[in-house]
């Protein structure tokens, strides 16, 4: 069964450093997303991406965050200057263009720890 | 303010019984609602989607209902098994074009053998 692949599975970074989280969405999906989950809290929407541009973003997704599809397979989330409160599990997801009855396919996540 | 609430943080049932999980929302008019399963340290896994004009959806032992008047969705697992133990999340979106799911906090289901 096709899956969304995320790397690395765990990243530790110092406060103020830049991090790039990587994702390979399902190949025939056209919508891509980033969500995050702080430990013990809800899954929160960050950004959706379609046709090489951001289609929707939340208040969390401020100027410190950016997304990119650098080639035909990868989808990245960059945090420019990490803060302690950015520590969370970051999930990439993708979905089919029509939505249908298939929901979103999530990756296993990258656990980001900012120290 | 907009809220999504899922009943009880935890639900314990005996194997073989039906588990019923509730998702209530306020100040939303969702275009559709989705249910996911999440195991510890893993990403959500999609289970079922139900649209605003649908009353009920089934998939194997799973059933979801959607009542837009009550602003509630019920998620049922029949003939529950210990392997069904997980956290179940409801998520909604107000617009099929917007594609920005809002998740509830989840209900942790424990099925006792």
Image: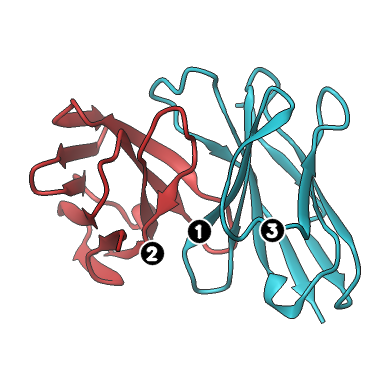
- Tell me, yes or no, whether the two marked residues, 1 and 3, touch with CB atoms within 8 Å: no
> What residue is shown at x 42% (from left), y 51% (from top)?
B102
Q: Which chain is red?
A: B
Q: Residues within 10 Å of mark 1 (few under 14, many from 20)?
A: many
Name the chain letter of the residue that bears numbered label 1.
A
Q: Residues within 10 Å of mark 2 (few under 14, many from 20)?
A: many
> What residue is shown at x 41% (from left), y 20% (from top)?
A100
Q: Are marks 1 and 3 on the same chain?
A: yes
Q: Which residue is mark 3?
A: A62
Q: Indicate the quadrant where residue B41 lies.
A: bottom right
Question: Residue A28 at x, y = what percent?
Answer: 65, 17
Q: Which residue is mark 2?
A: B105
Disc on res. B92: none
Name the chain letter of the residue that bears numbered label 3.
A
> What residue is shown at x 29% (from left), y 71% (from top)?
B10
**Is residue A108 rendered to the left or right of residue A16?**
left
Is the image coloured rainbow, by chain, by secondary structure, or in one colour? by chain
Question: Residue B109 at x, y = what percent?
Answer: 31, 63
Q: What secondary structure is found at the residue carrying circle 2?
A: loop
Q: Quadrant of the C terminus of chain A?
A: bottom right
- Tell me, yes or no, whether the two marked residues, 1 and 2, touch with CB atoms within 8 Å: no
Q: Indicate the quadrant where residue B23 lies.
A: bottom left
Q: Which chain is cyan?
A: A
B83 and A64: which is toward the camera: A64
Please tell me which of labels 1 and 3 falls first in the chain: 1
Above/below status of A47 relative to B49: below
């Amino acid at each position: 069964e096709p899956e969304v692949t995320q790397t690395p599975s765990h990243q530790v970074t110092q406060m103020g450093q830049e991090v790039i989280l990587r994702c390979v969405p399902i190949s025939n999906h056209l919508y891509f997303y980033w969500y995050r989950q702080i430990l013990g809290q809800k899954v929160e929407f960050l950004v959706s991406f379609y046709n090489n541009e951001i289609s929707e973003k939340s208040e969390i997704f401020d100027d410190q965050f950016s997304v990119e599809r650098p080639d035909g397979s990868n989808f990245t989330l960059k945090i420019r200057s990490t803060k302690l409160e950015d520590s969370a599990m970051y999930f990439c997801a993708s979905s089919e263009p029509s939505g249908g009855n298939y929901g979103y396919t999530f990756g296993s996540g990258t656990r980001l720890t900012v120290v | 303010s907009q809220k999504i609430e899922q009943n009880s943080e935890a639900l314990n049932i005996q194997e073989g019984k039906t588990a019923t999980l509730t998702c209530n929302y306020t100040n939303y008019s969702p275009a559709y609602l989705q249910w996911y399963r999440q195991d510890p340290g893993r990403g959500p896994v999609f289970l079922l989607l139900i649209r605003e004009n649908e009353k009920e959806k089934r998939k194997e032992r799973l059933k979801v209902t959607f009542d837009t008047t009550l602003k509630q969705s019920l998620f049922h697992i029949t003939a529950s098994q210990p392997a069904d133990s997980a956290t179940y999340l409801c998520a909604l979106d107000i617009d099929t074009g917007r594609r920005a799911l809002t998740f509830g906090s989840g209900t942790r289901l424990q099925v006792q053998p």
